[in-house]
Image (cartoon, grey):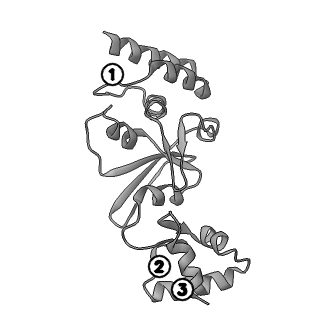
C-alpha cells in the first residue's frame, strides 16, 4: 500500500517537491498522514530532505526546480539567463532569480540570490517561459530585469537581443527612466 505513494513521486517528471506538492500529488487531505509517510520515505532513503518542507527524489535534483520553491512567486532571470544566452561572459556559481524580496541563501552548496522587483512586473507572465518544473525568463526579459534593477550594467554581447521584443516587454515596467536606459543600450549596440 505504501509503495503506491512513493511511485507517484518516482513517476513524476519533477525532481523537487514541497510538502504541499506532495499532498496534492497523493491527493492527501490530512497533513499528519502525509508527514508520517514522508518521514518514513526519508528514513528509507527513498526521499531526500533538502530543507524543511522541501524534498527531492534524490541528491541529483534539478537546482532550478529548487530555486523557485525557496521563495514563491519567483522566476529564474538576470545573470543566470544572460550567461546561458551568451549576453554576458562571466560565469557565476549562483542562481539568480527575481522575487518579491531581496535575499540570498545557500542550500547543498548552491547559492540562490533573489532580487526584489515590483509586484506588477513579478506577476506579469510576458517573456517568462513557464514549464512544469520551473519558470525562467526569456533572454529579453532577463535583459530587461537586469537593466531595471541596475542603473549601469555592462553586457558583453547584445547582438542577439531582439530589440522589438524588448520594447514590447518594456511596457510592463512602467518607468520612463528605464525606457531611456533601454534606448541607450540599443544605441550602443548599433554603434
Sequence-first disc among 3 and 1: 3
Sequence-first disc among 2 and 1: 2
At 63% from the left and 69% from the top, the residue drawn is 20
Residue 150 percent across, percent down from the top left: 43, 31
At 26% from the left and 39% from the top, the residue drawn is 90
Residue beneath disc 1: 159
Left/right placement of residue 25 relative to residue 17 reads right
Mark pair 3, 1: CA separation: 51 Å
Q: Quadrant of the C terminus?
A: top left
Is residue 131 at all visible to an observer of this figure?
A: yes
At 63% from the left and 70% from the top, the residue drawn is 25
Sequence-first disc among 2 and 3: 3
Residue 49 percent across, percent down from the top left: 46, 76
Is residue 52 at all visible to an observer of this figure?
A: no
Asked if residue 189 is positioned above or below residue 88 in the image, the reply reads above
Residue beneath disc 2: 47
Residue beneath disc 3: 39
Asked if residue 106 is positioned above or below residue 190 in the image, the reply reads below
For numbered disc 2, what is the local secondary structure? loop
Amino acid at each position: 500500500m505504501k509503495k503506491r505513494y512513493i511511485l507517484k513521486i518516482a513517476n513524476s517528471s519533477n525532481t523537487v517537491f514541497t510538502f504541499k506538492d506532495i499532498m496534492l500529488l497523493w491527493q492527501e487531505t490530512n497533513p499528519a498522514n502525509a508527514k508520517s509517510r514522508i518521514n518514513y520515505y526519508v528514513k528509507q532513503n527513498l526521499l531526500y530532505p533538502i530543507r524543511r518542507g522541501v524534498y527531492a527524489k534524490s541528491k541529483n535534483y534539478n537546482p532550478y526546480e529548487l530555486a523557485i520553491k525557496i521563495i514563491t512567486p519567483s522566476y529564474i532571470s538576470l545573470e543566470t539567463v544572460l550567461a546561458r544566452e551568451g549576453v554576458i561572459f562571466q560565469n557565476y556559481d549562483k542562481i539568480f532569480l527575481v522575487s518579491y524580496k531581496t535575499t540570498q541563501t545557500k542550500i547543498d552548496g548552491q547559492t540562490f540570490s533573489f532580487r526584489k522587483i515590483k509586484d506588477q512586473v513579478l506577476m506579469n507572465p510576458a517573456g517568462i517561459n513557464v514549464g512544469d518544473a520551473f519558470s525562467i525568463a526569456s533572454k529579453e526579459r532577463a535583459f530587461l530585469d537586469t537593466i531595471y534593477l541596475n542603473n549601469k550594467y555592462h553586457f558583453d554581447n547584445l547582438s542577439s537581443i531582439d530589440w522589438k521584443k524588448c520594447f514590447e516587454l518594456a511596457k510592463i515596467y512602467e518607468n520612463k527612466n528605464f525606457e531611456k536606459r533601454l534606448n541607450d543600450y540599443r544605441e550602443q549596440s548599433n554603434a
